[in-house]
Amino acid sequence: MDADSDTGASADADADTEAITGPPDGMVDARDELTPMLSQYFDLCAEYEDALLLFQNGDFYQTYCDAAAEVARVCELTLTRREDSTGTYPMAGIPVDNAAKYVERLLDADYRIAVAEQVEPPEEASGLVDRAVTQVITPGTLVEDELLGAGTKNYVAAVTRAAETRAVAAVDAATGECLLTSVDDDTSLRAELDRLAPAELLVGPDATVDRESLSGAPMVTDHEAAAIGAEEARERLSAYLSRPEAVIEGEAELRACGAVLAYAEWTQGDDGSLDYVTRVRRYDPREALGLDATAIRSLELFENRGAGSSETLFGVLDDTACALGRRTLDGWLRRPLVDREAIEARLDAVEALTEAALARETIREALREVYDLERLAGRVSRERANARDLRSLKATLDAVPEVLAGLDGVAADADRLTHLRDRIDPLDDVRDLIDRAIRPDPPVEVTEGGVIREGFDDELDRLRETEREGREWVADLEARERERTGIDSLSVGHTQVHGYYIEVTDPNLDRVPDDYTRRQTLKNAERFYTPELKRREDEIIGAAERADTLEYDRFREVRAVVAEETARLQGLADALAELDAVATLASVAIERDYARPTFHDGGIEIEAGRHPVVETTQNRFVPNDAALPPRSVTLVTGPNMSGKSTYMRQVALIVVLAQVGSFVPADAATLPVVDRVFTRVGASDDIAGGQSTFMREMAELTSILHEATPDSLVLLDEVGRGTSTADGRAIARATVEFLHDDVGATTLFATHYHDLTGLAEAYDGVHNLHFAADRDDGDVTFLHRVAEGPASSSYGVEVARLAGVPDPVVERSRALVGGERETNGHDEGVQVTLDGVEASGDDTSKNGSEADDDLVETLRETDLARTTPIEALNLLADLIERVEE
């Protein structure tokens, strides 16, 4: 270690830790007055000014001055201090051997981290140890397994814009996957970012991203890499694609892909190698079922805000055998298919595996032995794989013959399985090389020997034999010398400082032979060596050092040979991942009694459908049919807690599952292929964004009414409940009419506005379903069974009683409801009916019946079928103003 280095954070553990908020005045500016080590630290800080520098000093990563105070706060470390010729300043250190948990905290606090390692051994340094930044750690470019979840994707994405084209490129630095697409508007851009869910986002100078609304709250940066020019991007991409123009379309995509790869390279330090990024894949968003952030959240595909992570659709499906399959299944659920032929091909593969139990279990058992091949290949390519990584790779390749054996018994039953069988490369050459070269249980450290297998290299074997013979000679020396000298207490030992020695206690020194040379004097003994012992020691040490060096060289050569097969390893990983995902869907279908869906050009027809998540949390789940004609609006009424929302969601989830290529929770399902699923379910304020519940609801509704098509599935739950009854009822009716007349999407619309059910008499494409309940002496039993027609009551007071509302409140509510029904048969206030506006019994308008007649005439003259949502809202505001005059 250099002369002015620290001994770690513990060195000053007992120092006075009074408040020290920064360096002495002028410390940073007066560089000529800094110690060499601090000068080196600040130079590296300046070079990586947008990152927090962790500066290796022996066994610790140190930070100084203001950075130390921040690291101590975030990582909950003791803020110590250092004194030198510069003065006194704060210091905080992170143990090198336990850095991961502290790095994770810093990343969670939105820091980039530049890691400056000691790049030369301290004992070889003449003065200051040379240091260099070897890696920049950011949320989107993590490659360390301890910082990444098993089987998860972790993207850094870049967004650029050229003219009206917005492009998104994303890289998973741990696996080498690179995705690329482009869209024509900001709404579609947001949807793609929601589906990618990047951990980090680079925004180009011309791109517009609503940062506050991004799913997953990624780190967002206007990094200079995102401003990369087209020519520079083309030059950079030439290292990854022989013909970039064959994959990339347009300037925006070119710049986005170049930007994200440039940034990922920058995070890898001086080398910046991303040779393992061999799969730059362009996709078209229109080739997947549209699921925006609202739909993903409402349907609880990946996150259940009210329960555990397992109580999600992904949690129900995720019985994958390996990390590869888990990532693939996640991707399938984020991007269900819209190509009917591709869906059927995947379903064929799932069905073949459901019918071949032995083959399925053989495949799944073999896949359980498969390590994360994508990440292993990435580490090998980056020259960061150790010997244990190579043995893990070999264990993975050992499982491939079993996988193939399982497929041989079923592949002929589905073209997709046959295709998978053909894509699985056993990589016997790589497997054999690792088996011959690397010991079965090697140490983690690859520079200290014990890695290369005996018989792999003749020179290495000779050196190890010399070392072994020398150690055996030393082991026998003690017995020989005791016999030769007659000193029974004589012992032979070794220290790192003094080497091998023969120790004789003071009472026996008179019997020491003449060929003994004194090496060390102890309190009650002397240590000696002989010429032969010295020669053997030199042989042992020399052979061991040369063997360690040669062994490390041989290991690097083996790793380099394996790295040359990165593309083959990634191809195998892709095939095993898809097979695991298909086998998992088959296994879930068998265990949960799912049925294969069929497809047609009509409506949604489901027999005894079930909610795939809710049924796993209840002892008894009531299945329900769904018969939704194409391009229809189905109004769903009934009490709260009766099952309306569950029913709507289960229909959507069955559609999603079917287009994933999965069997579905139903006795039978005949479905159309839908292009998008829209949801407006539940209500919540967006306080940070300044949106009320109602404003949030209207914003989501606006998106649906503008973007839905006749091939979409729309779920609307209690539209209009965030405002007054009259306003909400009017908005709900206008929405139903617009969906029916202008959009044509298949719609499920749950509502408590019972007068809307009369729309079924006026429109052929509007239908009523309801969830009934039994009332017996004030007790209500929810049947959770859907039936034709509208509900007779919402049972709101009864639900309040079930929720535990005090009896006086419940009884007063009943009295008020009863009195209101006797007075006017409906709620007080203005009520929209099929014929216009019906005045309440409490008429407080200034103009009386003339005002009512005027309002009725206005509504009758309005063509609601041709009124846009915004025009309807403006009309409503005008009517309210006239009522209040």
Image: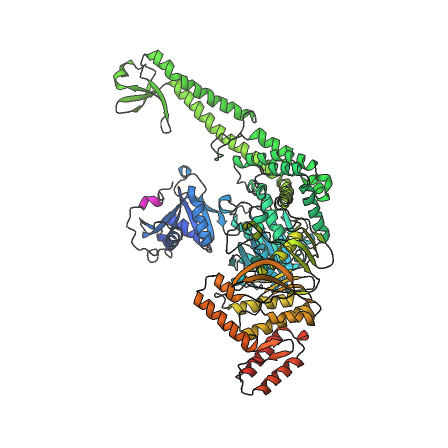
Q: Main secondary structure of the magenta part?
A: loop
Question: Given the current orientation, which residue lies at the most extreme front position?
Answer: 777
Please check the rendered image and state whether residue 10 is part of the magenta-colored stretch, yes or no.
yes
Residue 48: percent from left, percent from top? 47, 53
- Residue 41: x and y in percent read 41, 50
Q: Residue at x 43, y 18 (%)?
A: 473
- In the foreground, 759 or 716: 759
Examine the rendered structure and indicate whether residue 339 appears above or below residue 522: below
Residue 631 occupies quadrant: bottom right
Where's residue 189, x and y in %? 60, 61
- The percent position of residue 82, horizontal first and vertical second, equals 32, 49
Image quadrant holding the N terminus, namely top left
For this rendering, which residue is in front, 133 or 821?
Answer: 821
- Residue 684 seen: no
Q: How is the image coloured?
A: rainbow
Residue 267 part of the magenta segment: no
Question: How many numbered discs, if any?
Answer: 0
Front residue (pair 203, 234): 203
Residue span colored magenta: 3-15
Classify 440 as above or below 114. above
**Is residue 463 at all visible to an observer of this figure?**
yes
In the figure, is residue 147 to the left or right of 71?
right
Left-right relation of 463 to 61: right
The answer to whether 539 is drawn above or below residue 724 in the figure is above
User: Of 280 and 799, which appears nearest the observer?
Assistant: 799
